[in-house]
Amino acid sequence: MNPEPRTEMVNPWHVVAVERIDPVTTTRVMRQIAASDGIDQLAYREAEIDSLWSLVHMAVRADIPGAAEVLNLLWVAHDSVADERQEEALAALAKVRDHPDLESLNRDVWNVGEQEERS
Amino acid sequence: MLNKEHNDLLTRVGRGTPTGDLFRRFWWPVITSERLGGADGSPKRMRVLGEDLIVFRDTEGKVGVLQAYCPHRRALLYWGRNEERGLRCAYHGWKFDVSGQCVDMPTEPPDSTYAARLATIGYPAEEKGGVIWVYLGPKDKIAALPDYEWMTVPAENRVVTSFIQESNYLQALEANIDTAHVSYLHSYLDADAGPQPPQFMEGYRRMVNGDRSPRLTVKQTEYGLLYGGRRSLPDGKYYWRMTHWLAPATTQLPSTDYGNGTIVVPMDDHSSMSFSLLWHKDKTIPQSTQSQRRGLVGDDQGTTFKLSDGYVIDHPRGFVHVDNDYLIDRAMEATKFIGTAGGTAAEDRAVTETMGPVPDTMGKISDRSEEHLGVSDVAIVAARRALIRMVKALQDGVEPELAQRGDLYHVRGADIVTEHEDFEGVLTDYGQQLVTA
């Protein structure tokens, strides 16, 4: 079971290093959102979701199954954070975090698949 | 990124658009006093927020900014005669004063009072800081003129130049809110080989080349936002570049003794004009300094430029532009990051005028729904959101308070070397450098 976002001991000025789209990274972003208040901090959250979106957009371009659905959820999270609707953003990100295809959207995973297919 | 709806919202500035309505709550520079010239001089064709304008200075030196077309038969007033306290249309001789009031209608019967009852659209205009300003919004909501420091210094202590940006205004504005790009686009491979910009701290090039991934901190303010870009230095100190974005489209860039700013004026959805400002509170600045720095000096400048829909404005295009590939010289890239000619302005224009466009926008509006941003773009993210909030507030009937608060423009950028790692510490110790009297 994935951990729920916690607000204790979270520094809202910290920026999550988004290098993969996976439950751990998504949960970290969710914790930051839950701890963030005000438009300055939410600008960082939007930038973090931008990065998640970018990773998934690469998967959409590569026609990876499930990518389009996750991208739509990230659009919702992105625009919700931008409008200071953190609860809606968290709900969308929870669906991202729990999405069954999430790990397969990472480039290193589908590159491996492509390489295996070629060999 | 921005979704398509928000990208469209922010980039459309014509009359009746939400952002166009917001922008009409503010004063905009339309032309420099120098370019307009003296009394009874040639009228100038300009465009601001999609409005075609004629700017002229009458016999008494008063400035008029009128709708460009004669209300009689819609002839372009540019062809008119500027004489005896008014602009007389070349077609039938109808004459208008600086307010737009018709003061002579020679083709009508001599006893007609029609002239007194007819006016063209004349916009409120002011001349201050070496710039002609125009207000295009509702008369009952007229804004306060922004009270910038550069407008109050002696004329010989400032240089105001203007240049055309052949893209939507937002691309130009965002370049001014992006400190990360100075480590690349405006850099020399050997930092010591590049010229020292007068407004930046000595050693600026070494500092921005030495740390090419600045950490950004953003703080929303009453006027827009302040952000600091922090770069690490070899001695353990930090180089902070502090930039203000003042809504709607001004940036006060990092500087030391000098003030340094840019106002991006949307001419229409596809073109804009930047007013570049360099000033010093106490020192005279040679008028050539800014032009040379911005690369605005060159051959083949001409006097006019045809906008994408065919309307001509009285402003030179500049000697580097998209049609000559900004005179890019790949051999120059042995020393300079980008081999374009024309200085920093052309470097910015090369990358921002040719961004991946939204279809059917003549290639002039960037498609932000296809962007892939990083954390170094957080100031741009924050500025876009602030602007969207202002636009939506006005749609909900909330007027922008900033438009009535010229005093909120009392800020200036700064570049600072300090031991402070944190933004708040910099503000505590150096905050006075960021405000003006």
Image (tube, coloured by chain):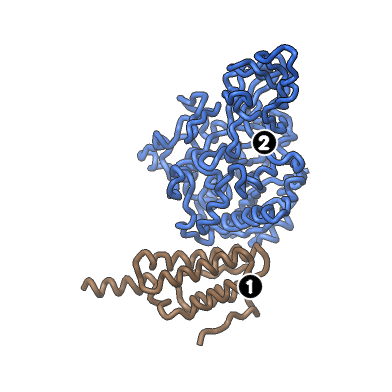
Chain colours: A brown, B blue
Residue B171 placement, left or right of A60:
right
From the viewer's side, name the closer residue of B414 and B105: B105
Q: For residue B293, what is the image quadrant?
A: top right
Residue type marked 1: Asn
Which numbered dot is residue A11? 1
Which numbered dot is residue B7? none
Chain letter of mark 2 equals B
Q: How many marks?
A: 2
The 10 Å Cα crowd at callout 2, few under 14, some 14 to 19, many 20 or more, is: many
Q: Position of residue A42 (x, y in %)?
A: 62, 65
Residue at point 77% right, 41% down? B140
From the viewer's side, name the closer residue of B219 and B108: B108
Whether residues under marks 2 and 1 lie with C-beta atoms below 8 angstroms apart, the answer is no
Label 2: which secondary element: strand
Q: Position of residue B185 (x, y in %)?
A: 47, 46
Q: Position of residue B397 (x, y in %)?
A: 72, 54
From the viewer's side, name the closer residue of B106 and B171: B106
Q: Is residue A118 above or below residue B337?
A: below
Residue at point 74% right, 25% down? B117
Question: Is residue B150 at all visible to an observer of this figure?
Answer: yes
From the viewer's side, name the closer residue of A38 and B339: A38
Which numbered dot is residue B279? 2
